[in-house]
Amino acid sequence: MTSSIPSSERAPHRVRRGVSLYSFQEEYFLRTLSVEDCVAAAADMGARGIEIIPEQSIPGYPRLTDEFVARWQEWMSRYGTTPVATNAFLDTKLQPGRLLTLDEQTASVQRDIDIAVRLGAPIVKATINFSPEVMAASAPYARDQGVRILLEVHAPFHLEHPWVQAHLEVMHRVGPDALGLMPDMGIHVRRFPRVVSERALRDGARPELVDYIVRTYDDHGDTHALMDIVNYRGGGPVDFALARQATHYIWTEPKDMLDHMPFVGHVQAKFYEMTDDAEGGHEFSIPYEEIVPVYADGGFDGYFSSEYEGNRHIQDVFEVDSVEQVRRQQRLLARLIGEFA
């Protein structure tokens, strides 16, 4: 995509490359890669920003030992990487028969902020179950600790969704030094992920229904009617699952983020399938060639953090190679941010 903004009018930017260790979940689960191996793989690709999910990668979470912190700091030094973000999920159902109170939820968030501080990460990702009230209550502590809590805008949510709008009201009131946004690039899925539809076929979906679902999505049709249509056409459980999955992907224009750019502190660079073609590779479903220039033109100062999620859709027939998939996306990102021609 060629930018429509004259170079003389573009805001300065510093788009950098990172990796969420979530990308390597297949190999980490199978114990073919350790946490250190994941960090080393990211560094080998020139992706210096490391995003970690403590619940996944820190033994004994939520307890964080001095031993792990020392090893983490040694890895960052050895591989020339830097901690960028941690993830927090805010489990509100820890007590039987009730949700955690606001004070209990805020204390949980403060604990996750403390973990980020000890690991040296300036960002905590808040998943969509963080309420606006919890964000507001947690903001003063985050500010005091020099940490930003960023709400993940994850499909099927989007900027105009009432839930996100309620969060934006809080963010504007509190300020971007404590709260902000972390767009997940799953909000920019232009084409139905091929690895998902092909998995459905292998699982026994009817080809004509798969084709109809994919075409409806790609043509920006009424995906919420798909389950009724599948029902009328006698579809089975796999067909219904694929129709429902189609409602979980969305396409929004990347430029819609420009008005909110002061609040955008980090990007989850989700991807499902990196091709390896003569043009240097691209993501089958998500047009990064259009997305990255928009963020650069908007003055984005942060990391595009690879988040590979194609693994779960191919593991029935292929040996998953998350490292190679992430490497291909990192080559694409490097090209798009001008690291090499």
Image (cartoon, rainbow, N blue to C red):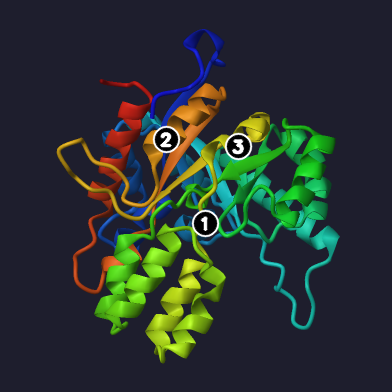
Chain-order first, disc 3 or disc 1: 1
For the N terminus, give its image quadrant: top left
Say which residue appears at 64% left-offset and 41% top-offset.
181
Q: Would residue 96 be seen by someone viewing this image from the given angle?
A: yes
Name the residue beneath numbered marker 3. Answer: 257
Where disc 3 sits, the SS reads helix
> At 83% from the left edge and 53% from the top edge, which residue is drawn?
133
Q: What residue is shown at x 27% (from left), y 67% (from top)?
A: 314
Q: Can I make out residue 122 in this image?
A: no
Q: Residue furthest top?
A: 8
245 or 29, which lies in front? 245
> Label 1 near label 2: C-beta < 8 Å?
no
Judge the density around disc 1: few (<14), some (14-19), many (≥20) Cα neighbours within 10 Å: many
* Relative depth, front residue between 35 and 69: 35
Using the image, tell me which numbered label, if any, was put on residue 79. Answer: none
Considering the numbered disc 2 on the image, is that residue within a helix, a strand or a loop? helix
Q: Residue under circle 1? A: 250
**Location of residue 91 (image quadrant):** bottom right
Q: Is residue 320 above or below residue 260?
A: below
Residue 185, how many percent across, how many down?
48, 47
Q: Nearer the viewer, residue 196 or 42?
A: 196
Please provide percent x and percent y for residue 125: 60, 47
Task: Compare residues 290 and 80 and report the one nearer the observer.
Answer: 290
Q: Which residue is mark 2?
A: 290
Q: Amino acid at mark 3?
A: Met
Image coordinates of residue 43 in percent, x first then y, are 32, 35
Q: Disc 2 residue type?
A: Glu
